Amino acid sequence: MRRPTLEEVASAAGVSKMTASRALRGARDVSKDNILKVRAAAERIGYVGNQLALSLSAQHTNLIGVVVPTMSNVVFPEVLSGISAVLEGTGMQAVFGLSEYDAAKERDIIRNMLSWRPAAMIVTGLDQPEETIRLLRQAAVPIIQVMDLDGEPVEFSVGLSHTMAGEEMARALVAAGRTRFGYVGSGLGRDLRAAKRKAGFEAALQDAGLAFVAKETAPELSSLGLGKRLTQRLLAREPEIDCLYYSNDDMAAGGAFACMENGIAVPERILLAGFNGLDIAQALPFSIATSHSPRREMGETAARLALQAMTEERPTLERVVAFTPRISMAGE
C-alpha cells in the first residue's frame, strides 16, 4: 500500500508544503491554527514523517534526548512523566536512554543520541567523566543536567543539593534526640547522589559531636530485600542503634520489614530515615522519616528550560534552578 505524502497532508490542510513541513516540526513561526490543521490532516490520512530526512535537511530534529540511570523504581519514571507532560503539544518528542548507573554506557547512549541531531539533551547528574562532558560541551544544543546541584553543570542544572539534603536530615534527627546512628546503603560507587547524601549526613553528625556507630553497604542497587538483609546484619552486630539512615526509601522500607520481624518498635525504639518520599514508605504500618524530592517538578522544569533555550538567548536564562526537599519526620 502506498504511503501518504507530505504534499497530500498540505493539500488536505489547505497550506503550502513548506508550511506543512514546518507545522509538523512545531516551528514557532507557524501559527497555532495552522499547526492544528496540519496535524489533524496528517492524522486523518495516516501520514508518518521521515525524521531521518528532516535531520539531514535541518540543523536539528524535533527530538530531545533524555538519559536516566534506571526505571526500577518510581523516581525516574516521575521525572520522565514531568518531561513528557511539558513537551506534549509542542511538536518535540523525548527519546529515552537507560544508563544503569554505568558511566561507559551513559557515554555511548549520549554519543548515539547526539548523532541523531537532537534539539536538546537532558542528562541525569553532574558527575560524568571528562570524555562524556566533552561530548556534551561540543554538542551545540542546550544541555540540561537534572537531579543534582553538587557540581559544575555543562550549561544548565535543575535539581537539589544531595549533600545538603543529607546534612538537613541529620540535623533533624539529632534534634529529635537520636544519638546512636547506623547507616545502610547500596550501590554508592555508582549512585553518586546517594554517596553525597551520606557524606553530608556524616558531616552534620560530626558537627554535633557524633558519628555513625555502624555501617552496612553493598555494591548492588537498592531494593526492599537488600535493605532488609543489611538491616538485619547491622542490628545483629549493634543492637543498641536508635536511628538508621538509608540511602533511599526502598532500602528504608526493607529495613522496616526487618524491624517488624524482630519485634523492634519503629519509630519508638529505632527511628528509620530515607530519601525520596516514596509511596511505599508512607504505606507502612508505621511512619519513617524521609526527604521528599520533587521529582515530577524537576522533570517539568528541565523540559521548559530546554524549550526556552531552543528559542531564546541562552546566556539570559537562569543557569541553575534549585529545589529544596521537604523533610517529614516519623509520625508526621
Image (spheres, helix red, strand yellow):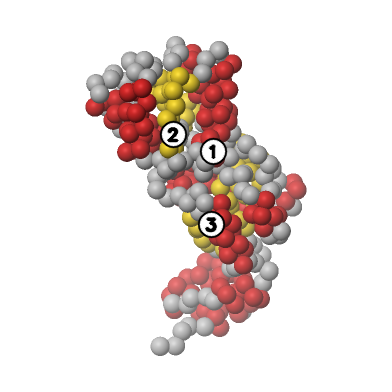
Judged from the image, the secondary structure of the residue bearing numbered disc 3 is helix
Task: State yes or no: discs 3 and 1 in contact (Cβ < 8 Å).
Answer: no
Left or right: 120 with respect to 188? right
Q: Which residue is mark 3?
A: 105
> Amino acid under label 1?
Arg
Observer-nearest of 85 and 128? 128
Measuring from the top left, give residue 1's x and y in whole percent.
Answer: 40, 88
Please give left or right for residue 8 compared with residue 73 in the image: right
Query: In the drawing, what numbered circle is on residue 217?
Result: 2
State the quadrant of the C terminus. Answer: top left
Q: Residue at x 51, y 21 (%)?
A: 170
Q: Position of residue 24 (x, y in %)?
A: 56, 70
Label placed on residue 193: 1
Residue type beneath disc 3: Lys
Q: Is residue 156 rendered to the left or right of residue 190?
A: right
The answer for how far apart the CA atoms under marks 3 and 1 are is 18 Å
> Can you tell which of label 2 and label 3 is closer to the viewer?
2
Q: Position of residue 214 (x, y in %)?
A: 44, 23
Q: CA distance from mark 2 to mark 3?
A: 24 Å
Residue occupying the point 49% across, 13% down: 175
First of labels 2, 1 by sequence position: 1
